[in-house]
Image (cartoon, coloured by chain):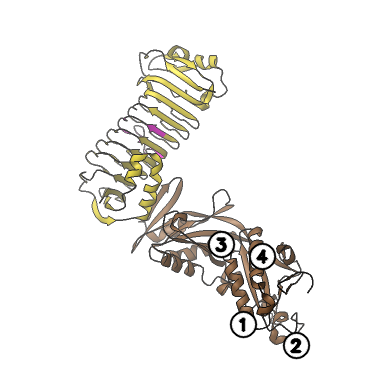
Chain colours: A brown, B yellow
Amino acid sequence: MSGLEIDGVAIEDTFAEAFGMRATRLIVTAANRAWAQHAAISATGFATSVIACGCEAGIERELSARETPDGRPGVAILIFAMSSKDLQKQVERRTGQCLLTCPTTAAYGGIAAETAREWLGLGRSLRYFGDGFQISKLIDGKRYWRIPVMDGEFVCDEKAGLVKGIGGGNFLILAQDQRAALRAAERAVAAMREIGSIILPFPGGVVRSGSKVGSKYKALLASTNDAYCPTLRGLTRSQLPASVGAVLEIVIDGLDADSIRLAMRAGIESACHRGSERGVVGITAGNYGGKLGPHHFHLQEVLT
Amino acid sequence: MTPLTFRLRAPPPCLVDASPLVPAQLAGKQRNEIERLSLQGWNQSFAVGDLFTVTGDDHGRIALEGLNGSMIRVGAGLEDGELTVIGHAGQYAGESMRGGTLSIRGDAGDYAGAGMRGGTLIVSGRAGDFVGSGRSGEMHGMSGGCIVVRGDSGDRTGDRMRRGLLLIEGDTGSYCASRMVAGTLVALGRAGVHPGYLMHRGTLLLADRGVEVPPTFNHNGRHELLAIRLLLDSLAQYGNAFKQFARHRRFDRWLGDLGCEGKGEMLIPA
């Protein structure tokens, strides 16, 4: 490691490699915050990685009643997938199974019409659940669907905007032990959650099982990132100095590169705050030599 | 630039079709060309200059002044721009309009906004029968846009209406929303007999708690519906009366007309 340090924590001169995705924002509202959260948590569940989940999703932020289309408390969620078709499938399934089913909820598209590149069907296909009793309502030029359900009506936009997003922004926190790594990661996540237009799709925003491309097993596309596993030091070509006892990664998906940069900066600065006395050793990032993704986030650039 | 203004010199001897006096048809024309334009009457045609005094130069904003109901199809087919009528706009005002704004400072005759597809039609006075309906023989009424009548409207308001927003601040005549296919009709005054007659789908909001709901509507219960809240909140932009009405949250909901498809809803404040 060379160059930049924050509070005694070395920032490696490397970059996070990210790739293009398709993304959308949904606004979920409900009778109160609790039910909006139930719906949003459910809709963004099992969505850590596109590899096995089909999409990456997370809660962007809570919305006050003044910020939502229907004047009720809400939550903004972001969903990312590798193609428009995949995203359509995931939006449809998650809306149908997690939002439609949740008491009192309504779902709206959260991407402004002028920024949408394409449109995803939201109520367009979900309406058929109404079995012919669904009602379409055009309000201020926007079509809504009213689907009769047992607590009244499920209201949703006919469509939601799709934009180009970026997935796979990341950085790794190298710490003396697991406890120090976890605390640094928690500080980073708390700071990053304040940034809009991004999500941290992994549990609690943190990944412990960083992966490399390929495996000794032919059937597997990815396997454990042995160079960063402290229990493999001495056995494999480890990237970890002797002082590192645990590594945690934070993965960021965002609607634009600037938001990812902002989030990385906030996260790294928080993780490194009084880092040397808290057992944080270094910050690095995951990349594939620049061949996989077109978006490169150089740590030292992000921080300056 | 001042609005291109047509002031009626004297009432013509018969009804005259004023539909050519819209921005799209006058664009790029000099005033003398405009004055030579022909307007079709019952059995004869008239030069614009013989009927109107023409002033102003903004072809995107047109005003017709001093009308007495002898002009018909005022603003028909309007696509963009502003057309202001001062006086009685006559029959078929705003017929088949697709965009722009037609403001009538006065009354409108029968069939105002008939077959309308887009834009905004505002009548400050009262409107005649068949507002927002289809022309005689047509299968559908208005299919887009917004009509606001500040006064009363006549019978069969919104007949066969298919889409769009029809707002009546005053009273409505008999059979409002008759044969309605879809869309939204809001009436803030008293409603005449047989509202929603043979209504297929669509939403009919009536402020008149004393209205006699036809027997072919079933009471659906009292509801506070989110979609209706969204709809009412959007009406605030159409004036104070609608803003006041938007305060209602709970409605008696009636479903019908069961004499046909029966998927329409009539909502009356609880």
Residue type (three-letter) at the residue carrying disc 1: Arg
Q: Position of residue A168 (x, y in %)?
A: 65, 67
Comparing labels 3 and 1, the label whose residue is closer to the camera: 1
The mark nearer the N terminus, 2 or 3, is 3
- The reply to whether the C-beta atoms of the residues labelled 1 and 4 are less than 8 Å apart is no
Q: Chain of mark 4?
A: A
| Membership of B133 in magenta stretch | yes
Q: CA distance from mark 3 to mark 1?
A: 37 Å
Report the disc number at residue A87: 3
Q: Residue at x 20, y 44 (%)?
A: B210
Q: Which residue is mark 2?
A: A235
Looking at the image, residue A165 lies above or below residue A251: above
Residue type (three-letter) at the residue carrying disc 4: Arg
Q: Chain of mark 2?
A: A
Task: Work out whether residue B54 or residue A94 is closer to the camera in this orientation and state it.
Answer: B54
Report the disc number at residue A179: 1
The mark nearer the N terminus, 4 or 2, is 2
Q: Which residue is mark 4?
A: A265
Q: Position of residue B70 (x, y in %)?
A: 36, 19
